[in-house]
Image: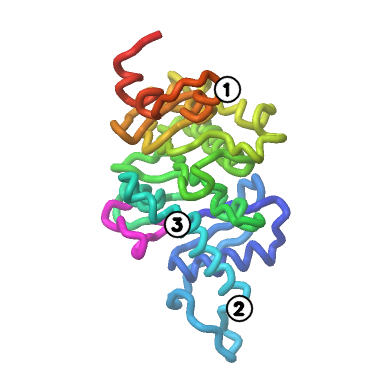
Amino acid sequence: MKVRIGDGATEEEASAIATAMARRFKDDVEVYVGDGDEPAVSRAPTGQAAAPLPGDDGLGPTDRELQLWKEIEDILGGGPEKYKERLPEQGKRFVRDRIDLWFNAEQSSASSRTESGDGDDGILFEDGKFAEFDADDQLPADGLITGAADFEGRKVHFMANDFTVKAGSMAEKGVEKFLRMQQRALKTGRPVLYLMDSSGGRIDQQTGFFANREGIGKYYYNHSMLSGAVPQICVLYGPCIAGAAYTPVFADFTIMVREMSAMAIASPRMVEMVTGEEIDMQDLGGPDVHNTRRN
């Protein structure tokens, strides 16, 4: 398992993260700091059971490692429980369960989730797992999961919005992860899979990342560079509004689900505010609109 943490992390912090994750997931862990090409710390699993209570023998785990285990569990759990409870009513799965179905088909329940996967398929790498988890309102992975995985014997890059975190909206750390994923795909030439369910840019955090050179504006440059060179496949599991709506347009294949998927530059509420017209999401940008109408 490979984990990448921020530039400001100390060697002690990297070591604690590597040790905690190796014990928790029973897998080899390499922790990279910033954009470094070589791991700062590597740890092998000890065979110790997950989250044992600390003892007085000094063998560990330390209090910091226990705290990291708890943080990892919270991150894997996504956003507030009330939002997760609404997903079945919308015909959706929680994003990490959805990812498990794509890449860990034999381990598709949250209780048996692993980071590396077993068998031929599995997640090879998740980027920025701890992104924004230290924010005041704790935003696990900043609402966007990115990484690389094996799918039916082929390595792919992927991204997936977590709709339980601010309605899958995009903000600074999530944008950084998205761009790194695209740039890796440009380097490797491997396919990109976009699993989208996003309300667009996070309206209260758009300063400094929305249209600058290393922000959402670079999405479109990277999409253009990937086009015709690297396969881009997009699956819409819900709405894709505003800036998020461009990704399925750039993709070589876009799959939509009737009565669930939609893409539009503005939401129905915004349309009503500006024009006075009342329209629902499916009539505005559902699958039938995009497959049967042309401007």
**What's under tag 2, amino acid-wise?**
Thr
**Mark 1 highlights which residue?**
221
Query: Does label 3 or label 2 sit earlier along the sequence?
Result: 2
Q: Earlier in the sequence, mark 1 or mark 2?
A: 2
Verify whether residue 139 appears in magenta: no
- Amino acid on which disc 3 is placed: Lys
**Residue highlighted by disc 2:** 62
Give the side of residue 232 with respect to residue 152, left or right.
right
Task: From the viewer's side, name the closer residue of 93 and 180.
Answer: 93
Range covered by the magenta-colored residues = 104-116
| Distance CA(mark 3)–CA(mark 1) | 37 Å
Q: Position of residue 34 (x, y in %)?
A: 66, 48
Disc 1 secondary structure class: helix
Q: Can you see residue 209?
A: yes
Which residue ends up furthest to the front in the rendered image?
276
Dot 3, how many residues are within 10 Å of its Cα: few (below 14), some (14-19), or many (20+)?
A: few
Q: Residue at x 36, y 45 (%)?
A: 150
Residue type beneath disc 1: Tyr
Q: Which residue is mark 3?
A: 82
Q: Height in image: 261 above or below 292?
A: below
Q: Residues within 10 Å of mark 2 (few under 14, many from 20)?
A: some
Q: Mark 3 or mark 2, which is nearer to you?
A: 3
Instruction: Compare residues 98 and 114 and report the one nearer the observer.
Output: 98
Q: Quadrant of residue 30 in the image?
A: bottom right
